[in-house]
């Protein structure tokens, strides 16, 4: 299964290589922006945009509402996995 994680572009570190810093839940990572970059558009115009990140690439630009909804579902899934793991430990 492929999973894109929402993150917000907070800076451009290398416009020539199309690399920016994306904040995902307070963790900032370098991400390749080439999949979302339009020809002849300054990457600075993508600052503060939300994107779906998969294996180090920003795959698409999304709106903030979609990003927040996705983050909420991912948090809920993480909590559910913790509860399932705790239940499995109790079966032993």
Image (cartoon, rainbow, N blue to C red):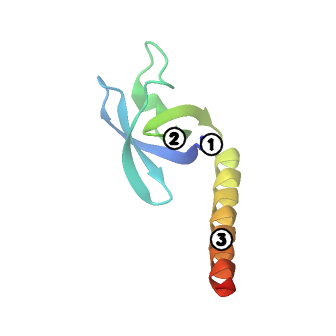
Residue 34 occupies quadrant: top left
Q: Alpha-carbon neighbours of circle 2 within 10 Å: few (<14), some, or many (≥20)?
A: many
Say whether residue 50 is visible.
no
Relative to residue 11, is residue 87 drawn left or right?
right
Distance (Cα) linking label 3 and label 2: 21 Å
Q: Is residue 85 left or right of residue 18?
A: right
Task: Kindly identify the residue that appears in the image at 29 percent across and 22 percent down.
Answer: 16
Callout 3: SS: helix
Task: Please report the residue visible at 47 percent of the width from the left and 23 percent of the height from the top.
Answer: 37
Q: Which residue: 42% across, 58% down?
A: 27
Mark 1 / mark 3, whichever is N-terminal? 1
Provide residue 52's location: percent of width, then percent of height: 56, 40
The correct choice, above or below, for 85 with respect to 91 in the image is above
User: Which mark lies nearer to you, 2 or 1?
Assistant: 1
Q: Quarter holding the C terminus?
A: bottom right
Above or below: residue 23 compared with residue 53: below
For label 3, count other residues whose C-alpha is less than 10 Å away and answer few (under 14), some (14-19) or many (20+): few
The foreground one among 78 and 13 is: 78
Q: Which residue is mark 1?
A: 1
Which secondary structure, mark 1? loop
According to the picture, the residue beneath numbered tag 2 turns out to be: 53
Which residue of the protein is positioned furthest toward the top in this rendering? 40
Assign a secondary structure to mark 2: strand
Q: Quadrant of residue 14?
A: top left
Q: CA distance from mark 1 to mark 3?
A: 19 Å
Q: What's the mark number on residue 79?
A: 3
Q: Are marks 3 and 2 in contact (CB under 8 Å)?
A: no
Who is closer to the viewer here, 78 or 86?
86
């Amino acid at each position: 299964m492929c999973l894109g994680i929402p993150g917000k572009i907070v800076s451009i570190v290398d416009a020539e290589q199309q690399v920016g810093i994306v904040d995902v839940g307070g963790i900032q990572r370098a991400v390749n922006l080439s999949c979302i970059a339009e020809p002849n558009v300054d990457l600075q115009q993508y600052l503060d945009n939300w994107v779906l990140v998969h294996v180090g690439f920003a795959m698409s630009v999304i709106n903030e509402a979609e990003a927040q909804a996705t983050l909420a579902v991912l948090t809920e899934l993480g909590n559910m996995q913790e509860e399932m793991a705790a239940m499995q430990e109790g079966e032993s």
